[in-house]
Image (spheres, helix red, strand yellow):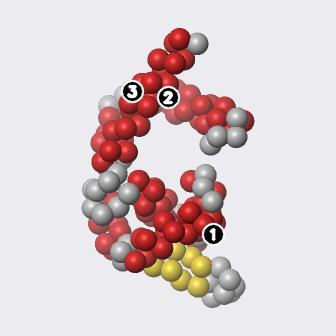
Amino acid sequence: MEAAWAVAERLEQLARVPFTGSFSHGLNPAQWAALRYLANAGLTTSTVTAFARFHGTTKGTASQTVSALVKKGHVLRHASPTDRRIVHLEVTESGRALLETDPLERLARACATLPEQERSCLAGAVDKLFAALRAQGIA
């Protein structure tokens, strides 16, 4: 358990790198996460509900996050032409410009320095950690 604790502490330190930078450009970490998610979402996944599921939060919390991005002009809402109950979200030009300064970029660049095999092993290990947390009802 001691080795597992040491790994957990290192992961916490690593997570702080992008998190600390996520209080920038008038955004908070949840808003950065939403902007990232929506920039890569397809038509069927560009909704508050889909973001809430992906981010592991409630629809209400996700809605507040998205509303803040809409007020700041980084996201637009569009009613579905086929079902008016569905609202699709789109990242604006200002939102895309912000993503060019994404605080997660530093960590991504560091990951890119790892050999492909190590990145693959790390990605697999992180997936297993998420699965273990989900099994505990945490993630």
Tell me if residue 78 comes above or below residue 38 in the rendering.
Answer: below
Tell me if residue 88 comes above or below residue 102 in the rendering.
Answer: below
Q: Is residue 41 visible?
A: yes
Tell me if residue 23 comes above or below residue 91 in the rendering.
Answer: above
Task: Out of 4 and 47, give the one closest to the viewer.
Answer: 4
Give the x, y percent position of residue 42.
56, 66
Q: Secondary structure at mark 2?
A: helix
**How many angstroms separate mark 2 from mark 3 (CA)?**
11 Å
Q: Amino acid at mark 2?
A: Leu
Q: Residue at x 58, y 13 (%)?
A: 1
Give the x, y percent position of residue 117.
47, 26
**How many angstroms separate mark 1 from mark 2 (CA)?**
30 Å
Badge 1 local density, few (<14 within 10 Å), some, or many (20+)? few
| Quadrant placement of the C terminus | top right
Q: Residue at x 43, y 61 (%)?
A: 31
Q: Amino acid at mark 1?
A: Thr
Q: Secondary structure at mark 1?
A: helix
Nearest to the eye among marks 2 and 3: give it. Answer: 2
Q: How many marks?
A: 3
Q: Amino acid at mark 3?
A: Pro
Q: Is residue 107 visible?
A: no
Judging by the rendered image, the residue that carries numbered circle 3 is: 115
Give the x, y percent position of residue 77.
51, 80
Judging by the rendered image, the residue that carries numbered circle 2 is: 122
**How many angstroms separate mark 1 from mark 3 (CA)?**
34 Å
Give the x, y percent position of residue 91.
42, 71
Judging by the rendered image, the residue that carries numbered circle 1 is: 44
Q: Contact, CB < 8 Å: mark 2 with mark 3? A: no
